Amino acid sequence: MLISASLDFMLTLSRSMADMSSTTTSPSDDVTESLIRLLDAADVLPGAAELRAHTYDLLRLGDGQPVVDVGCGSGRAVAELADRGARPIGVEPDARMLAAARRRWQDWDFREGFADELPLDDGSVAGYRVDKVFHELADPAAALAEARRVLAPGGRIVLIGQDWDTFVIDSDDPELTRTIVHARADTLPSPHAARAYRSLLLDAGFDDVTVEVRTAVFTDRRMLPMLTGLAAAASAEGAVDRDRAEVWVAEQTRRADSDRMFLAVPLFIAAGVSPTR
Ligand SMILES: C[S@@+](CC[C@H](N)C(=O)[O-])C[C@H]1O[C@@H](n2cnc3c(N)ncnc32)[C@H](O)[C@@H]1O
């Protein structure tokens, strides 16, 4: 149930990616593969590695300390945390994503599980990281209660993600763009979780809570599926009729083809400490 929105997102991405390519792969066949391709493309864009490194720094882990990456996807952060000397555990509910992580990073510990029911003992980790996941949760507060359970006193938590109503997209039709962005946000269980990180962490009892924002700018054609996925979702929801969505997608495709695509996404990064008292 909790991953249904993510599947919807993946399906729209998958459809739009299939439209862009000339392959005949069925969407249900490669929903997860489409998301992995998109995440892989985003992961190697300028600034992405530095941003991930910043989230690792915020965890302040010592050598060999256990840390969980929740909703780890295909596992890149787990491998990078291991490279830094930590002892990472990746938790992921999507069986196909989990299989991809295990295939890619055979030495590391990947477990099946949900953010609100982690396969970890009480107080067993020194760090908790979650990247681009909270918008998919029906109850982010329940996930943070679970984070409190698994973190040792003094353990650190780091959340990073986007607010789905603050995508900045250049288009000849700003009004339609606004409608598409809002309609896509409305399909998610918690589209505004990122702007609520600070309050959520405080409400969950974390100390020393900090928040910062880094804006990712996407102009690379490989990120076009982010945009076409928004339009596909808005159209599927009935917020925008299919013809208008297609015109918008055609404009964005022209922009991508002529190096005029522009998508800016503020990424919110919050950190906190599990109380020692
Ligand atoms: C956009 S992907 C991000 C993956 C990875 N964190 C990254 O940054 O590449 C979101 C991930 O959250 C996972 N997810 C969805 N619902 C979840 C839940 N309830 N608990 C934990 N993970 C969840 C999805 O399966 C997916 O792998």
Image (cartoon, rainbow, N blue to C red):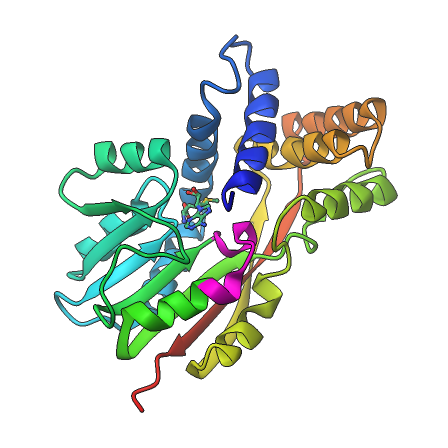
Pinpoint residue 264: horizontal percent, then vertical percent: 63, 51
- Magenta region, residue range: 132-142
Quarter that holds the C terminus: bottom left
Q: Residue furthest bottom?
A: 277
Q: Is residue 29 magenta?
A: no
The number of callouts visible is 0
Q: Does the rendering let one see residue 203?
A: yes
Report the residue at 56% width, 28% height from top: 11
Q: Is residue 88 above or below residue 237?
A: below
Q: Is residue 57 above or below residue 17?
A: below
Pinpoint residue 44: horizontal percent, then vertical percent: 40, 42
Q: Is residue 176 above or below residue 250?
A: below
1 sits to left or right of 57: right
36 sits to left or right of 276: right
Report the residue at 70% width, 54% height from top: 165
Report the residue at 84% width, 37% height from top: 172
